[in-house]
Image: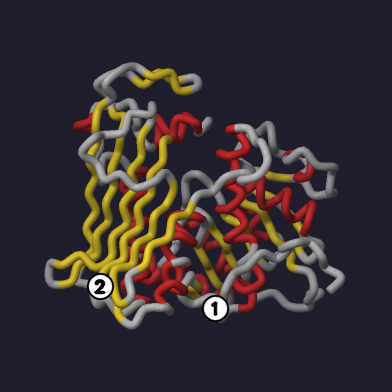
């Protein structure tokens, strides 16, 4: 951990200023005088050397972004807000070992259950730098980690926990993620949990979340298995700059199941489509996220994230609201992360994370 700092102001470095990273940066500039941006890592030459405020449509703040990783690692800061599309464990270990905590929306949601060699590397970096790493967001994140735990506080016993996410990605403008990373529009036989590095990674982060709940709630599961079912489009669909052809992948049903003696105790299911075609044989939860706890007593809650439920808002604003939620879950946790003991911090070990700004009345 760093020393000789103003304890009322934390120094942070956004690593990535894309969809989620930009929401963090604008929040810091507009609402968080307790946090100071001291650098920023970007990936394109067009952003290199540009003031961080300018990058997000604000006035310059006197800090320029850089593509130079060594410069970022050399900076003195309390925490790095790590939000890249593609993660790099070497980068995270270097940041942790250099004395900077890492708060990420991208991975490391339950480091104790990642590959043992990787886990040991991250822990050694934390011990070397006296630092902490925490991964969270929306899902994976709050809905699949933090939310089930306080709800479980009303249960005497638990038989099963299930989280279902139903979403159509047709309104998501980052078609490079939808089509290139997630491989919608590809042959259905080419979709599997190991079909690409990205799909394997995506499967792994939900597997971590199953382990997190199981470990926190004494499930004593034996294994977590992951499966994916791909279904073809019945007709062509224009999705922004891409065309999803009939017969190619238009739906993906991912299921991560934690079992004890063959019985599923914790399960996370994502029901994702592109093009608005929803398979008739799939489960039919409401759009959004449905969390069910079967036990004594049993309970269910449904979560839906929009720009507003009371004012008129554009589809772009509604889609953006999920990115805001993802970023705020991690940004609001930064003070707790910096105060935590060196090592791994998860939704099960950090204190309750709440909005720092809240209603905005800071006079009280």
**Quarter in which the N terminus is drawn:** bottom right
Q: Is residue 51 above or below residue 239?
A: below
Where residue 228 appears, as percent x and y from the top left, is: 24, 44
Q: Can residue 124 be seen in this view?
A: no
Give residue 317's quadrant in the image. top right
Q: Mark 1 or mark 2, which is nearer to you?
A: 2
**Quarter in which the C terminus is drawn:** bottom right
Where residue 244 appears, as percent x and y from the top left, is: 36, 21
Query: Is 14 displayed left or right of 249 in the figure?
Result: right
Q: Do the residues labelled 1 and 2 touch (CB within 8 Å)?
A: no
Neighbour tally class for label 1: few under 14, some 14-19, many 20 plus, Cα within 10 Å: many
Q: Is residue 177 visible?
A: yes
Where residue 279 appears, as percent x and y from the top left, is: 26, 34
Q: Residue at left 19%, top 32%?
A: 189
Give residue 199's quadrant in the image. top left
Q: Mark 1 points at which residue?
A: 342
Q: How many marks do you count on the picture? A: 2
Q: Residue 159 carries which label?
A: 2
Where residue 321 appears, as percent x and y from the top left, is: 59, 45
Task: Compare residues 24 and 257 and report the one nearer the observer.
Answer: 257
Give residue 177's quadrant in the image. top left
Q: Earlier in the sequence, mark 1 or mark 2?
A: 2
């Amino acid at each position: 951990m760093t020393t000789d700092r103003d304890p009322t102001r934390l120094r942070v470095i956004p690593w990535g200023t894309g969809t989620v990273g930009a929401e963090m940066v604008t929040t810091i500039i507009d609402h968080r005088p307790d946090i100071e941006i001291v650098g920023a890592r970007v990936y394109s030459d067009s952003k290199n050397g540009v003031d961080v405020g300018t990058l997000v449509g604000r006035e310059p703040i006197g800090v320029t972004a850089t593509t130079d990783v060594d410069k970022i690692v050399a900076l003195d800061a309390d925490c790095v807000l790590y939000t890249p599309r593609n993660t790099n464990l070497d980068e995270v270990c270097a940041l942790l070992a250099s004395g900077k905590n890492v708060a990420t929306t991208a991975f490391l949601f339950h480091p104790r259950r990642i590959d043992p060699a990787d886990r040991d590397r991250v822990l050694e970096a934390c011990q070397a730098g006296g630092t902490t790493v925490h991964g969270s967001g929306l899902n994976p994140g709050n809905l699949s980690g933090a939310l089930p735990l306080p709800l479980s506080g009303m249960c005497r016993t638990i038989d099963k926990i299930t989280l279902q996410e139903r979403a159509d990605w047709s309104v998501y403008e980052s078609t490079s993620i939808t089509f290139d990373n997630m491989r919608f529009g590809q042959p259905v036989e080419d979709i599997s949990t190991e079909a690409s590095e990205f799909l394997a990674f995506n499967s792994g982060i939900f597997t971590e979340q199953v382990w997190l709940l199981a470990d926190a709630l004494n499930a004593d599961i034996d294994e977590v298995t992951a499966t994916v079912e791909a279904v073809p489009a019945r007709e062509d669909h224009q999705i922004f700059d891409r065309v999803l052809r009939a017969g190619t992948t238009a739906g993906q049903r991912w299921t991560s199941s934690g079992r004890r003696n063959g019985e599923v105790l914790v399960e996370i299911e994502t029901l994702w489509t592109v093009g608005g075609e929803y398979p008739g044989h799939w489960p039919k939860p409401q759009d959004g996220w449905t969390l069910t706890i079967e036990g004594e007593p049993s309970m269910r809650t449904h979560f839906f994230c929009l720009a507003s439920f009371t004012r008129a808002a554009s589809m772009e604003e509604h889609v953006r609201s999920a990115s805001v939620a993802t970023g705020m879950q991690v940004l609001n946790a930064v003070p707790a992360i910096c105060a935590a003991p060196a090592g791994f911090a998860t939704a099960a070990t950090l204190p309750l994370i709440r909005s720092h700004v809240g209603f905005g009345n800071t006079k009280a």
